Image (cartoon, rainbow, N blue to C red):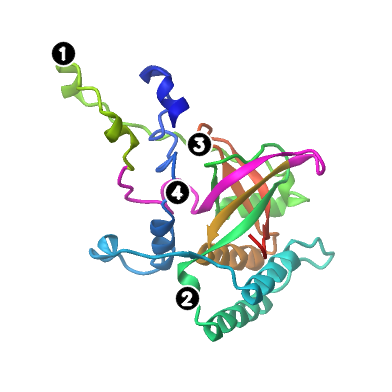
């Protein structure tokens, strides 16, 4: 953020146009809350409720979840596992969590991203879920990660005519106002693809000759990802996008059992 404020106002990237709701922090609590109520009808009091979250560290649950994603990522001749098998494995994972008195709807899962083609995941990059059109493009290409990565459409901002008529300059914001976290209305649906989580660290890995990063994703988002991709018969690939770019990049997901 310090580097961002060094630029003059006309040289700073417009995060509103780039559809980046939170460029310098991750609203984990709101992310988990929105994934819990994604399929439910909107309620006025939901935004005022304080939602808690925690990082999932149960080795039994993580081991089964990691095995589920590892099995789905394997390149098989007969395709990926069926949706019924995946649903049964998810039920076993939830049963294991209930036995340990864990509520997975509040959980964040530590994941490792491996870039499938171009791009290197960096800190504050967003992790997004592919849409139906993206899945169709992945099914037409073999392998799926060779499909052309999409781009995010820029948001058009309405120009206020009253602002042009005012000749007086707006007061410069204080340091406290610049450093204060803004209120975010939408996180999961802030852009054209559902937001799963964010990258906390990443760089180019010379041993594997590709970009790698570590991030956190909502458990309910990962469940939606694995169910959607398994039903379509494709590998569970995700997108990561830098906060200054509109270009999405393909990446594979691996669940970290120790983080």
Q: Residue at x 51, y 38 (%)?
A: 152
Point out the residue furthest to the top here.
167
Q: Which residue is mark 1?
A: 167
Image location (x, y in percent) of residue 35: 44, 63
Q: Are marks 4 and 3 in contact (CB under 8 Å)?
A: no
The quarter of the rendered structure image containing the N terminus is top left
**Mark closest to the chain's N terminus, 4 or 1:** 4
**Mark closest to the chain's N terminus, 1 or 3:** 1
How far apart marks 4 and 2 lie (CA) works out to 21 Å
Q: Using residue 217 as the reference point, say whether residue 27 is left or right of it.
A: left
Q: Which mark is residue 26?
A: 4
Q: Which stretch is magenta?
A: 182-210
Viewer-side label of 1, 2: 2
**Mark closest to the chain's N terminus, 4 or 2:** 4
Q: Which residue is mark 2?
A: 103
Image location (x, y in percent) of residue 212: 69, 45
Q: Using residue 184 as the reference point, say whether residue 188 is left or right of it.
A: right
Element under disc 3: loop
Viewer-side label of 4, 3: 4
Element under disc 2: loop
Q: Which residue is mark 3?
A: 243
């Amino acid at each position: 953020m310090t580097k961002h404020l060094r630029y003059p106002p006309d040289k700073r990237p417009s995060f509103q146009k780039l559809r980046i709701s939170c460029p310098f922090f991750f609203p984990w609590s709101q992310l988990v809350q929105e994934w819990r109520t994604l399929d439910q009808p909107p309620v006025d009091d939901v935004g005022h409720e304080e939602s808690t979250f925690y990082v999932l560290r149960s080795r039994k649950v993580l081991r089964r979840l990691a095995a589920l994603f590892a099995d789905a990522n394997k390149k098989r001749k007969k395709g990926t596992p069926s949706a019924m098998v995946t649903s049964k494995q998810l039920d076993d994972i939830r049963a294991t969590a209930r036995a340990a008195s864990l509520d997975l709807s509040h959980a964040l899962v530590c994941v490792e991203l491996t870039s499938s083609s171009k791009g290197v995941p960096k800190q504050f990059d967003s992790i997004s879920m592919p849409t139906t059109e993206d899945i169709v493009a992945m099914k037409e290409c073999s392998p799926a990660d060779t499909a052309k990565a999409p781009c995010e459409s820029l948001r058009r901002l309405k120009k206020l005519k009253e602002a042009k008529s005012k000749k007086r300059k707006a007061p410069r914001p204080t340091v406290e106002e610049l450093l204060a976290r803004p209120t975010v209305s939408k996180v999961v649906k802030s852009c054209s693809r559902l937001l799963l989580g964010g990258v906390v660290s990443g760089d180019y890995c010379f041993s594997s000759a590709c970009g790698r990063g570590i991030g956190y994703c909502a458990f309910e988002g990962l469940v939606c990802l694995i169910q959607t991709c398994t039903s379509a018969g494709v590998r569970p690939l995700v997108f990561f996008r830098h906060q200054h770019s509109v270009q999405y990049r393909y990446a594979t997901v691996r669940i970290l059992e120790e983080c």
